[in-house]
Image: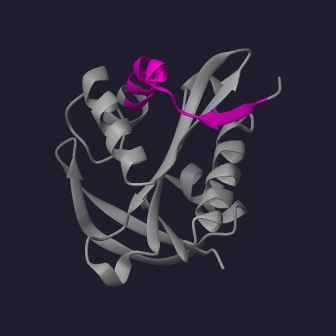
Amino acid sequence: MPVAIRNARPADMAVVNAIYNAQGIDTTASYGYEPLGEAYWLGWLDDQYAAGRPCLVAEIDGQVVGFAYYAPFRGKQGWALTVENSVYVDARMQGGGVGRALMAALIQQARADGRHVMVACIDAANQISQDFHARLGFELMGVLPGGGRKFGRWLNAAFWIKQLD
């Protein structure tokens, strides 16, 4: 099944919300605790586009099955060209190339936007995500022991980077 990548639209945010709540809240893919709602994502999308940052969705047969975006890595001016990526794929579609297609397009967009480095902060126990990023050319730069907490336990955060220029 071919994967189509496009810019997200407000009508996509219900599916984005469902994917995030299943893949981000119910796992350690995100260190967020509380499920978000469609209204959150609608406001977030407006803010994302107003700041000139992308949000991409992947479609198969007209159905949104994943999304990816980048956001600022840190807030100070000296970090302006470094971004942090996030990519989430519907569990039923993982392993089928959706994430790779999203990340290829996101990396291409970041380069076109003049970004210098892309960072992926990954739960160190998530070997699948680490291997995925390694295949995309990201390199492990270090691990922050006990840097996060979720599900009643301390989590180690692995930082992976990709030079974009």
Quadrant in which the N terminus appears: top right
Q: Is the magenta stretch mostly helix, strand or loop?
A: helix
Q: Is residue 7 magenta?
A: yes
Residue in view at x 74 percent, y 39 percent: 97
Image position of 150 with respect to 43: above or below: below
Q: Judge left or right: residue 72 versus residue 4.
A: left
Frontmost residue, 156 versus 132: 132
Residue drawn at the location 22% of the way across and 41% of the way down: 151
Instruction: Please give the name of the residue rendered at 35% of the width and 27% of the height, measured from the top-left corner.
Output: 21
Left or right position of 132 against 142: right
* Residue with the most extreme left position: 152
Residue nearest the viewer, comparing 69 with 159: 69
Q: What stretch is highlighted in magenta?
A: 3-20
Residue that lies at the very extreme toward the right in this rendered image: 1
Residue 106 showing in the rendered view: yes
Q: Is residue 37 visible to the viewer in this orientation of the structure?
A: no
